[in-house]
Amino acid sequence: MKLYITEGSPYARIARVVIIEKGLQSRIEIIYAQTRKAGSPYYAINPSGRVPYLIRDEGAALEESALIVDWLDQLDGKPMFSLPPGEAGWEARRLEALARSLMDGLAVWSRELGRPENERSPTTIKHETARSIRMADVWEKEIDHAWMHSAINMAQITLACALGLDARNPDFRWRPGHPKLVAWFDAFAARPSFAATAVPRR
């Protein structure tokens, strides 16, 4: 199988962390794609140009990190990331969605910074900067939730991959004023799967 990624994509990082946590490294080739570039050969592989993109050996390719993760988790018949039943499962979904909301806003900000300086939108950057501060404030409270301190799960992975985007965007200053969130992230960042997928600093 082949997983197409870019090194700075937090969505691709989610899939890469899961691959390592599941011990699937020998079964999946990681390939760096050229995205947001006119005429990239990657567009012949995935016309949407998005990552991550998993080409399965035995079937159709998969796009979207959530879909890819779900499929990878079932691959060995020993799912790690199944959700608990009832209200606990809804809480897990709520926290994962909250982490994804932070990530989505940061991705918009990052794409804006990737444009030539004269093409960037100050309004968009200001909006996403303010949003990131609000979300960090929310997570300083939510990080006490038991689900964020249980066995590794998708809410944890998503949040860690979002917070790790400060390596790409030094203006994403989520650490000041959020000591509990900092302590949680630093502990999670010590996991081999997270260290091995570190985002290169800009």
Image: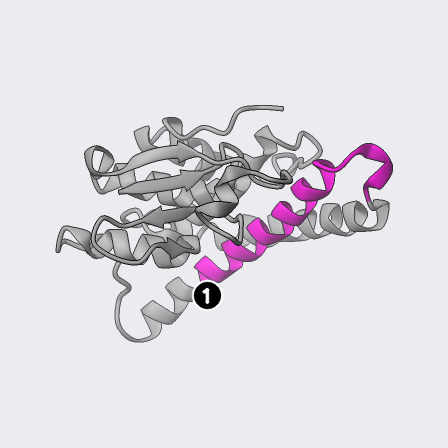
Q: Taking the image as drawn, is residue 51 in sight?
A: no
Main secondary structure type of the part rendered in magenta:
helix
Q: Taking the image as drawn, is residue 162 in sight?
A: yes
Q: Position of residue 11 (x, y in %)?
A: 47, 46
Q: Position of residue 69 (x, y in %)?
A: 33, 53
Question: What residue is at 39 percent from the left and 51 percent from the top?
Answer: 148
State which region is magenta.
94-120
Image side of residue 75 versus residue 166, left or right: left
Question: What residue is at 12 percent from the left and 55 percent from the top?
Answer: 77
Residue identified by numbered label 1: 94
Would you say residue 21 sits in the magenta stretch? no
Question: What residue is at 33 percent from the left and 68 percent from the top?
Answer: 89
Image side of residue 198 versus residue 89, left or right: right
Using the image, determine if residue 155 lies above or below residue 196.
below
Q: Position of residue 63 (x, y in %)?
A: 42, 55
Which image quadrant: the N terminus?
A: top left
Question: What residue is at 63 percent from the left and 46 percent from the top?
Answer: 106
| Image quarter of residue 194 | top left
Label 1: how many residues lie within 10 Å, few (<14), some (14-19) or many (20+)? few
Q: What amino acid type should be assigned to the residue bearing mark 1?
A: Arg
Q: Position of residue 7 (x, y in %)?
A: 49, 32
Q: Residue furthest top?
A: 201
